[in-house]
Amino acid sequence: MGHPPLEIFAFEQRTPLELPLYLATVSAGFPSPAEDYIDKKLDLNEHLVRHPAATFFVRVDGDSMRDANVASGDILVVDRAVTARDGHIVIAALDGELTVKRLRRQDGRLYLVPDNPDYAAVEVSAEASFEVWGVVTYIIHKA
Amino acid sequence: MPTTTFALVDCNNFYASCERVFAPHLAGRPVVVLSNNDGCIIARSAEAKALGVPMGQPAFQCRDLFARHGIAVFSSNYALYGDMSARVMVTLSRFAPAMEIYSIDEAFLDLTGLPGGAAGQARRIRETVARWTGIPVSVGIGPTKTLAKLANRAAKKHPACDGVLDFSTHPDPDALLESVPIEDVWGIGRRYGAMLAGHGILSARAFRDLPREFVQKRMTVQGVHTQLELRGFSCLDLEKAPPAPKTLMSSRSFGRAVTVRDELAEALAEYVSRVAAKLRRRGLVASGMQVFVQTYADASGRPPYANTACAAPPSPTDHTATLISLAGRALADIFRPGWRYKKAGVILLGLESRAGRQLSLLDAPAPEAARNARLMAALDAVNAKWGKDTLAPAACGIGKLWAMRQEKRSPRYTTVWDELPVARAG
């Protein structure tokens, strides 16, 4: 057990992805002084994170959300500032465990529904310890 | 001249609450957090307090108690606490035109003249912070900072308050002041508390009602301010405050707006040197650091920008150069160009006695400090590129016998990719 490297902890996991946005088209094959045309660098956070203080990343374990394009090992962008509605994919704290499911409200009843026919939906009973932990806004999946 | 309305927002059992956000099975269970090397108890959830788990007690003396009650025990995880603190502070900054970060888990807000009243705003603040970050907070409101602090303490003590108490609408303010022991009044402290108790002054109310001459003769101007504040006359604006116990902080409002990052870094380096010197004088080391910045509102009417970043040294330290380099990196993370900065500061976290460590880095003399900082930066750069511990000061030893014991540390859920919380899809 060595000691951990120096780490900086910011309120948002900023991994600025510096993708220059070229405003001038450049013919391929030439080194070009295109630097002059770089308007700004795109930061993926701007696109994926609407509420930095309320946004967390959560890793998926299991394939019960396969048909919603959520694979095991994927990283989910979870925004706790978003109000959960019927049909949202949510992270729920159910009986002491974080789980990812689709939230369904029907006739005043609450269900956590998988997106994979091999798994069964769960009705959230009144006595279960349950809360919506956050709403999944993006799925980060390696191509 | 309308009177100011201050609110003190304070996270409930902050470290224990942080551990719970990502571990729902801990809801309602007693939780304790230990200092570095799993030495002493530094935080307790409400359930652990109710079981009589003593604050500051060495952990090995509590093993039976932990086992008997199924208490969840964690090593301190400053990466997590620092990140969660920043989230809470950023969320709070949306609710008031001015705020002052007071410690890792407390901030003063100016709630003067808000439509709907301060208490309504306080409830919205509580609800939003809980939803956005998962951290429960209490809010005390009052016409002075000292009364806001006192109201906050009472809000936490009485469940009926539901986490919000406004001193100015309290039905019996005298009884409330009567119920606060003198040494618990903000800014009084142990020494003056004992002196006052010797004179039979045992409560906040008794102190408030003392002749002013008595206080002037026996206490500093701060004592006089505290008394005036208890009487409802505000002496401490958002910039002035007695230091928080158990943390070391140095911060200042700049004489003029600062716009250049290097200038901010220089100011921070100076603050760090100051707190590091304090640290050494008291024989302490720090296991973490929080840097914060606040700006003026800008011409276009954007609300002011406020942010904080945390950093942790590889092991607890009192070494100025190490701390300066940490502060510089933390600043890099939160500095945004195009703002006029009003204030910056640094808070040292996780203070503990140096005596427990086998290794003590003596502070370098002043001319060495700059070279040392460059050395540290080079060291960090090399280790970042070729993996940690590629280069390490020989003084740290090869065997790392002193490496921190953190056997019960929770994952760094919010700051390390390999340690994200996991949601089951099964």
Image (tube, rainbow, N blue to C red):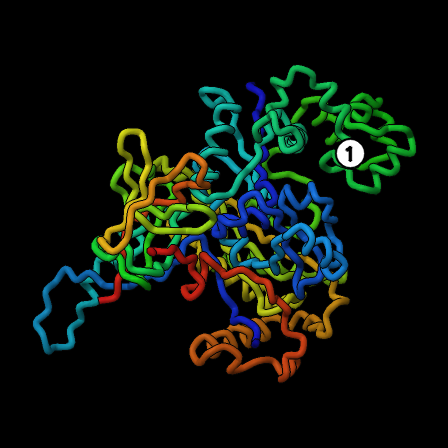
* Residue B418 in view (yes/no): yes
Q: Which residue occupies 73% across, 57% down?
A: B64
Q: In terms of depth relative to the viewer, which is nearer, B283 or B157?
A: B157
Residue B328's place in the image compared with B247, above or below, is below
Dot 1 crowding, Cα within 10 Å, few <14, some 14–19, many 20+: some
Residue A92's place in the image compared with A16, above or below, is above
Residue that label 1 marks: B223
Rendering coords of residue B349 (x, y %): 62, 55
Rendering coords of residue A87 (x, y %): 25, 41
Rendering coords of residue A11 (x, y %): 45, 52
Rendering coords of residue B382 (x, y %): 47, 79
Q: Which residue occupies 33% across, 64% down?
A: A73
Task: Farthest residue to the left: give it.
Answer: A27
Horizontal arrangement in the rendering, residue A71 relative to residue B398 (left or right): left
Residue A83's place in the image compared with B357, above or below, is above
Kindly state the secondary structure of the residue where label 1 is placed.
helix
Q: Which residue occupies 25% across, 56% down?
A: A118
Q: In terms of depth relative to the viewer, which is nearer, B138 or B251?
A: B138
- Where on the picture, by quarter, is residue A33? bottom left
Task: Farthest residue to the right: give it.
Answer: B198
Specify the amino acid type for callout 1: Gly
Quarter of the image that includes the N terminus of chain B: top right
* Residue A137 in view (yes/no): no
Q: In terms of depth relative to the viewer, which is nearer, B297 or B209?
A: B209
